[in-house]
Image (spheres, rainbow, N blue to C red):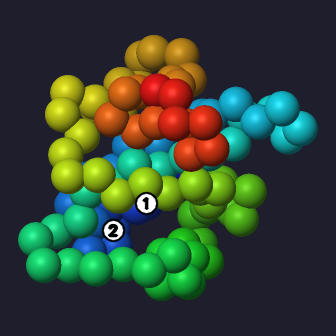
Amino acid sequence: MEERVLQRHPAISEAAVYGVPDPVAGDQIMACIVLRSGASLTPAELGAFLAGQGDIGRKQHPRFVRVVSQLGDVHPWKDQPPRRAPHCCPHPTTGDG
């Protein structure tokens, strides 16, 4: 899933998408998002929004979402191989970055 799809949501100002290892299913999708000032977003609201986006399939929806205050120097570099979650977005189950 591309960051641009997440950034279409009016509550999201920035987004970065990463692969996180899963011992059973292989890599899972994790999204780190920065909310706009004063905005809130529930998992159900995000799921409903993504379901309404016709250009991504259900398998491209993030399995994990983490709200962070900033992404820092993390940007979607298209010329690099698939990324792993950086320190600002630790693994959702282990906490490792």
Residue 95 in sight:
yes
Residue 43 has which mark? none
Tell me whether circle 1 and circle 2 mark residues in contact (CB < 8 Å).
yes
Residue annotated with mark 1:
5
Q: Quadrant of residue 66?
A: bottom left
Q: Please, is residue 36 above or below residue 20 in the view?
A: below
Q: Amino acid at mark 1?
A: Val
Image height of 14 relative to 9, above or below: above
| Residue occupying the point 28% across, 30% down | 74
Q: Position of residue 63 (x, y in %)?
A: 64, 56
Q: Residue 18: where, in percent of width, then height? A: 52, 36
Is 95 situated left or right of 76 in this image?
Answer: right
What amino acid does circle 2 point to?
Arg
| Residue 10 visible, this angle | no
Q: CA distance from mark 1 to mark 2?
A: 5 Å
Residue 33 falls in image quadrant:
bottom left
Percent coordinates x, y for residue 97 in the rendering: 46, 27
Could you classify mark 2 by the number of other residues whose Cα lies within 10 Å: few (under 14), some (14-19), or many (20 or more)? some
In the depicted view, which residue is nearer to us: 58 or 73?
A: 73
Q: Which structural element holds mark 2?
A: loop
Bin the neighbour count of mark 1 within 10 Å (Cα to Cα): few under 14, some 14-19, many 20 and up.
Answer: some
Residue hosting label 2 = 8
Could you tell me residue 76's position as x and y percent?
A: 35, 33
Q: Secondary structure at mark 1?
A: helix
- Above or below for 44 versus 75: below
| Residue positioned 45% across, 15% down in the render | 80
Left or right of residue 18, residue 9 in this image: left
What residue is shown at x 49% (from left), y 57% (from top)?
65
